[in-house]
Amino acid sequence: MAADRPTDEFGNERVDQLGDERVDHRFKALPPDAEGLTVAELAAERRNLFDGGFTTPVLALSAESVEHNLALLETYAERHGLAFAPHGKTSMAPQLFVRQLERGAWGITAAVPHQVRVYRAHGIRRIFLANEVVDAVALRWLAGELDADPEFRFVAYVDSVRGAELMDKALRDAGASRPLDVVVELGAGDGARTGARTEADCAAIADAVAAAPTLRLVGVAGYEGEVPQADGDRVRAWLRRLTALAADFDKAERFAATDEIIISAGGSAWFDAVADVFAEIPELSLPVCKLLRSGAYVSHDDGHYRHLTPFNRVPDEGTLQPAFRLWAQVVSRPSGEQAFVNAGKRDAAYDLDLPEAQVVRDARTGEIRPATGITVSGLSDQHGWVRTAPEAELEVGDWIGLGLSHPCTSFDKWQLIPLVEADGTVTDYIRTFF
């Protein structure tokens, strides 16, 4: 109900309540002697990750790197005149959503209705759903949320005439009193993911929206990361199709029911191209909200996005910092060429790249040194396979700090993640909801 919503702009009251949760067996790696404390009480103790009672494996987020990344995208968006709705599916962490909103984000992007429910439970008032919703149950719930909270702004994709018809029927059956804002999704090309394939298809969808009393057309959107054989020229060409579609719709007075046109794109690999092309948008009859949706930046990574980030192409704009480190302990050293750590597929992202051995923390001295000659060669469910060269210094009990690739499949394996300062002090715990 609307009366239960937090009163402040960013939902801090609801997020602060996460600190009231009790620490227990549900949360991997947290100190056994902390059982019964609230999360806030444990955070106030400022324990050290290495000698404060944590068990291995333990995933840590660098407090300094998270803050750096939040600030960098805030200034990037401001500099390029972009609104920003970072994709929340990456972290599903309301504490991070609040910090993104405090850093100027327009709202938070979602992929599926369940994520929208999580956002609403934590007070998020602007949500962009980068998908078409045809689930009647989800649409009935959305209608209730919109009716109960006049300050709730929700925008969703529509990519087919049939989808528009299903949305309209479900909303009419639910007795919706507020129209649902939609943007027509232009697909990134033949063989790409969702979205209408041609401008004629987009126009037919816009006609279907206009015929639906429960829907309101407010813009166009898409995802340039699905452009086939993507390179700078192909991505910019598709983005110009998207902005031209918005201009054509505007000329045809298709946005007459709104007071602002949303044009949205932008994953984590091509937001420089989005900034370039969106800067070319001509003056339209209404103000334009140029909405970027990149989400992986908040933690960045040591693999997939380290190679793909646009900041590699535009280094003068800044540099993101990888914030994740998974600490695992050597539990077996059967030969001079092989070792095993106690972290596997249940703990580390592995869908794109294997973890990268970065540092070793000596179990005898606590000294941290580079992981010279140490390579992760494979993962079992609960073990990491480690290959060691002759120069590698490693024994049972040592901790290995692993860099991870693909933040989206790192966050989802941990419900409560220590936020750690450079000296190992844990200052907070990030709660995820997958």
Image (cartoon, helix red, strand yellow):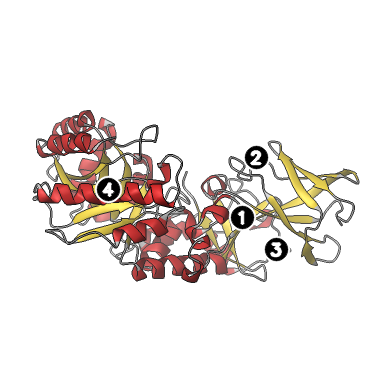
Kindly identify the residue that appears in the image at 37 percent across and 43 percent down. Answer: 111
Q: Which of marks 2 and 3 is nearer the N terminus?
A: 3
Q: Does residue 166 appear in the picture of this structure?
A: yes
The amino acid beneath tag 4 is Leu
Eye-nearest disc, 1 or 4: 4
**Label whose residue precedes the other's in the sequence (3 or 1):** 3
What residue is disc 4 on? 242
**Residue 269 versus residue 353: which sits nearer the camera?**
269
What secondary structure is marked by label 1? loop
Q: Mark 3 points at which residue?
A: 52
Residue 277, image quadrant: bottom left
Q: Earlier in the sequence, mark 2 or mark 1?
A: 1
**Residue at mark 2 to residue at mark 4: CA–CA distance:** 39 Å
Instruction: Give the percent coordinates (x, y) of residue 344.
Output: 69, 41
From the image, tell me which residue sits under label 2. Answer: 345
The numbered mark at residue 302 is: 1
Residue type at mark 1 is Asp
Q: Earlier in the sequence, mark 2 or mark 4?
A: 4
